Image: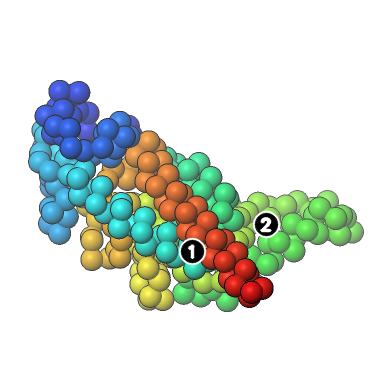
């Protein structure tokens, strides 16, 4: 099940009489959690309750996504490094797509402790992965026995799973983008310790005090996650475009 509840079209129309974005409704962004699971601090984002399930106020979601877009755009304009995180299957393809598009690091399998707080160690493991992979490709490991090669292949596979998405983590990230922060508290805590701003797509069970830019929404469904990341993608593209324009203008001024 991608959603916690099933709402009829009549219920959707009743809950959102025209003001909310049709795109968000179609993506299922409004699906919340059972009332018993809603964090009291998140009640500000609840529109109402349907069958024991809290329904998210999409007008507030629209407001919060605009705030996140503005922040992300400005950070991208300043050449920020974004680290994308969500280890749930529903988000894997979308996370990998946006990260690879911009050459950014990502985590879709498991958060490795110290990814942010112990960057020097993590960077050494990433470099080791690159070196072993290069040696395999160039035949530099052919001198080893078949048994030794099998063990090396196992090591590379394990490193690929854990560290493959972090190859572009060339420095400490400037922004952490997280889907379902409740599930990724280890990543949240590390970012907080390093004072790295956090942008998160979060459902009603999250703690808003943990997040710098929180966008309330259904953080379980593939369609809802894709909606959120599409907005983040647009913001990054606009920020990069602004940076390029500024660079061209600076170049023209220097020639005057």
Q: How many marks?
A: 2
- The x and y percentages for residue 248 are 60, 64
* Rendered view: 17 above or below 90: above
Residue at image point 37% right, 62% down: 71
Taking 83 as reference, is 182 left or right?
Answer: left
The one nearer the camera, 5 or 249, is 249
Label drawn at residue 116: none
Quadrant of the frame with the C terminus: bottom right
Q: CA distance from mark 2 to mark 1?
A: 38 Å
Of pointers 2 and 1, the one earlier in the residue sequence: 1
- Residue at the spot of label 2: 155
* Rendered view: 244 above or below 23: below
- The x and y percentages for residue 2 are 33, 34
Residue at image point 46% right, 49% down: 233
Taking 167 as reference, is 140 left or right?
Answer: right
- The x and y percentages for residue 153 are 72, 52
Label drawn at residue 77: 1
- Per the image, label 1 sits on a secondary structure element best described as helix
């Amino acid at each position: 099940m991608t959603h916690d509840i099933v709402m009829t079209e009549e219920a959707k129309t009743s809950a959102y009489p025209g003001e909310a974005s049709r795109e968000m409704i179609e993506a299922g962004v409004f699906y919340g959690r059972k009332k018993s699971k809603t964090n009291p601090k998140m009640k500000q984002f609840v529109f109402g309750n349907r069958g024991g399930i809290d329904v998210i106020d999409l007008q507030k979601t629209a407001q919060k996504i605009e705030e996140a877009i503005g922040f992300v755009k400005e950070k991208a304009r300043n050449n920020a490094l974004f680290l994308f995180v969500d280890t749930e299957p529903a988000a894997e393809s979308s996370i990998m797509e946006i990260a690879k598009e911009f050459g950014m690091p990502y985590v879709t399998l498991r958060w490795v402790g110290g990814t942010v707080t112990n960057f020097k160690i993590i960077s050494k493991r990433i470099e080791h992965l690159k070196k072993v992979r290069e040696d395999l490709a160039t035949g530099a490991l052919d001198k080893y026995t078949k048994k030794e090669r099998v063990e090396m292949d196992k090591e590379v596979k394990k490193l690929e799973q854990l560290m493959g998405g972090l190859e572009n983590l060339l420095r400490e990230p400037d922004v952490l983008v997280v889907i379902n922060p409740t599930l990724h508290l280890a990543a949240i805590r590390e970012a907080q310790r390093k004072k790295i701003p956090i942008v998160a797509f979060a459902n009603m069970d999250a703690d808003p005090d943990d997040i710098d830019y929180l966008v309330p929404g259904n953080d379980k469904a593939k369609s809802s996650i894709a909606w959120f990341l599409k907005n983040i993608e647009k913001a990054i593209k606009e920020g990069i475009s602004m940076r390029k324009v500024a660079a061209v203008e600076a170049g023209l001024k220097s020639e005057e």
